[in-house]
Amino acid sequence: MESLVFYREPFVLFLSLAVTLTETKAGFHSLKYLQSSMSVPGLGKPRFISMGYVDNQRFVRFDSDSSIEREEPQVQWMDKISREDWARNSRVVSETAHTFQVGLQNLQVYYNQSEGVHTYQRLVGCEMFSNGTFRRGFEQFAYDGQDYISLDLETLSWTAAVQSALNSKHKWEAEQGIAERQKVYLNTKCIWWLQKYLEYGKEMLLRTEPPSVQVTRHASPNGEVILRCRAQEFYPSEISLSWLRDGEEQLQDVEFIETRPAGDGTFQKWAAVRIISGQEGKYTCLVRHEGLSEPLTLKWEPQSSSIWLIVVVIAVVHLLISVLAGVVIWRKKSARWRRKGLY
């Protein structure tokens, strides 16, 4: 089970799926919803926010505090959805907001808590292969920033992450229909909606953009050297970065950041390796991505002296041009002043 990573926005905690990719996972698509409800004393009923993602691109958002009591589109291609589907989806998310409100009340009892600031969160969704077949489904909950309970689709049972979650486990497993209905949704309905959204947004969602990759060298004051392989401007988000030493993959002294949105519809990621100074030539960054016809390999290349010579020559030429321009301007002004008898 993937763990949930939490981050703050004003008044509300959101969750996001933390994914560390060790190999390219091209050929599948995902639909997931990240939902969060937060109770704050004195603010009335909890605020509920739901955000939907197709292939890690946010496409809908619902906020119970909004004056618009329905899901709001976040991408242009969602204007293709029918009014009936908009109404249906908005009704479902409104009912989910009420369920979360009741859930928060129950959890405070399970944890023996008084009133205060508390959060109840959910990650639910499905993945399918590019041929339309089911890959996997998932549903997991968190409370106050910690994993709480998750659904096991194979056994139709609930896995409690903490002792207090046993209350929910026993309650939900006593009514087996809860897990069975959720399995039907994740295996069939969720996949149906995912296919529909992919068709609506195929110009954006089914495109491929290869990564732009650069290897840089960074030296620290203590003499340690770090080589960083940075990939950016790629889509879809699945990518593999690995460091090789003399052709052997390095698993130690390697640091990754998770793939993250670049803000322009593409993604970025980097991998860094700590090495001994002088051994830079032994290391190669290997990049795999759906947009590449074959894996890409790069090494750090020190800037040659010829490059620096070119830079110096360009700087000198710019300086001479500036000096000559200044002399020409001064001569013209001097001539004008002489004609006017200023000196």
Image (spheres, rainbow, N blue to C red):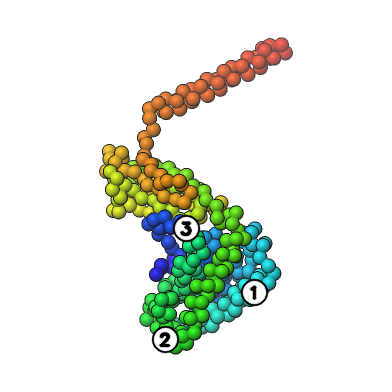
Residue at mark 2: 170
**Disc 2 to disc 3: CB gap under 8 Å:** no
Numbered label attached to residue 27: 3
Between the residue at mark 1 and the residue at mark 2, the CA separation in whole angstroms equals 31 Å
In this orientation, which residue lies closer to the viewer: 181 or 314?
A: 181
**N-terminal-most mark, 1 or 2:** 1
Which quarter of the figure is the C terminus placed in? Answer: top right
Residue at mark 1: 88
Task: Judge whether residue 148 can be spotted in this image.
Answer: no
**x and y, in percent, of residue 284 in the image:** 34, 43
**N-terminal-most mark, 2 or 3:** 3
Residue sitting at x 60%, y 69%: 62
**N-terminal-most mark, 3 or 1:** 3
> SS class of the residue under badge 2?
helix
Q: Nearer the viewer, mark 1 or mark 2?
A: 1
**Disc 3 to disc 1: CB gap under 8 Å:** no
Quadrant in the rendering for residue 171: bottom left
> SS class of the residue under badge 3?
loop
**What amino acid type is highlighted by mark number 1?**
Arg
Between the residue at mark 2 and the residue at mark 3, the CA separation in whole angstroms equals 38 Å
Q: Does 273 sit above or below residue 8?
A: above
Residue sitting at x 48%, y 77%: 183
Residue sitting at x 47%, y 73%: 139
